[in-house]
Image: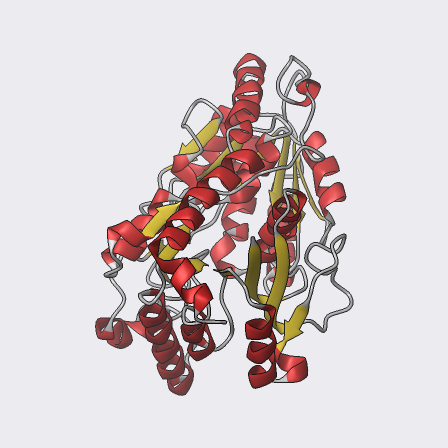
Amino acid sequence: MRIATVNSNARIAGGIESYLDRALPALAARGDRIALLCDYNTDAARPRIAAELEFPIWSINEIGVERAFAELRRWRPELIFAHGLADPAHEATLAAIAPAAFFAHDYRATCVSGLKRFGTPVETPCARRFGAGCLPRFFPRRCGGLNPATMIANYRRAAARLSALARYRAVLTASRHMRAELTRHGLAEEIVHCVGLPIANDRERADDRNCGDGTSVAAPSRILFVGRMEPVKGGPLLIDAAALATVALNRPLTLTLAGDGRERARWERRAQSVTRREPRLRIGFDGWRDRAAIAARFEETDVIAIPSIWPEPFGVVGLEAGMRGVPACAFALGGIPEWLDDGVNGYLAPADPPRAAALAHALVKCLADPDVHRRMRAAAGAAARRHSMAAHLTALDEVFARLMDAGGAGERAGHN
């Protein structure tokens, strides 16, 4: 099949691109032909999506929108696999070119800021339905920035994205949580499909010794955070929680934060303040690391912490760590409870609202008993292996087949 992928960036800049970096080679390996239409393909410091493959790339930023879409039509895709463009108006035209499925990875169509959280009086997730009623709450609840013009522009963009989603014959999500979010916003249940996410392909799969065969250290003590250092990621809460867990366990702990972002300097200042008060807690900042380096970090970790204070659409890093036999600790938000079984492959903390003390309690339960930790390691590996690339491709194929059967042949004939 000729599959045209559409995404804002051709370079690996975040979770969507990391997903495509795994999915596109898997599609190509079984014989599908791949192309990519994007907004940008200019950041040479970041690797290209699926760099091992040769396929056409049309960048709107480089050749203009009219030529990019003309090249896409000339390539004659049988199916469009869309993940979002900067301009919703461009997204809206895709469904007219070929049968199209849109993968909704986030809340950009159902939230003004895309964050689904209130910033004040306490950081807490937002469960409101997107609409005009969001506007009078935006500034008082600190949903985003403080520029009225930006707020209005973002509101209109989100509304346009939501309208564009309704034009697709299929909308995909990684979690049941996101599926419920979209159907709650008016999308027909029959077009929204939860297809999960693939955690690792065969090259990346950990062997059995990494999945809980008794190799846990006697006193598990190493906590890892991997991700963007942004306000919604909950870094200060995790730092405070690690200090509380150190006191509760009455032994040294190590917290490593791998990643970067706007909040890094603030997180570092919080870490310095906390470790002065609790010197048994050691905190290190790793910066961005490639996939191999993060996999090596997982091998040296006893629990992966996901302290997000917004409803993570899926929380894929927890299962990526689980593939190496690392249990997870997270707030019970968004799609995370769908794969994190409390007390089995990790522990969940209540999030009403998210608090450091609750996260600390979950960390203590993960780390207190080596025998419990050993059982969670085995369960973490088993949970991750259920999210295989093969299972994901099967779910995609079911949706793609429906698309083609629903009129794809007629649309392809229209290109002749």
Q: Indicate the position of residue 389 as horizontal and vertical percent values.
A: 57, 37
How are the colours assigned in the image? secondary structure
Above or below for 321 versus 21: above
Instruction: Determine which quarter of the picture holds residue 314.
Output: top left
Q: Indicate the position of residue 297 as horizontal and vertical percent values.
A: 71, 37
The residue that appears at 38% across and 40% down in the rendered structure is 332
Q: Which of 380 and 407 is in front in this view?
A: 407
Instruction: Determine which quarter of the picture holds residue 124.
Output: bottom left
Q: Which of 228 and 158 is in front in this view?
A: 158
Above or below for 372 versus 383: above
The residue that appears at 59% across and 74% down in the rendered structure is 74
Q: Which of 312 and 156 is in front in this view?
A: 156
Q: Is residue 42 left or right of residue 379?
A: right
Above or below for 155 versus 277: below
Q: Indicate the position of residue 309 as horizontal and vertical percent values.
A: 43, 51
The residue that appears at 36% across and 50% down in the rendered structure is 178
Q: In this view, does 232 lie to the left or right of 123?
A: right
Answer yes or no: is residue 352 visible. yes
Above or below for 145 versus 48: below
Instruction: Determine which quarter of the picture holds residue 70.
Output: bottom right
Q: Which of 336 and 309 is in front in this view?
A: 336
Q: Is residue 289 left or right of residue 13?
A: right
The residue that appears at 54% across and 60% down in the rendered structure is 230
Q: Indicate the position of residue 19 as horizontal and vertical percent values.
A: 58, 50
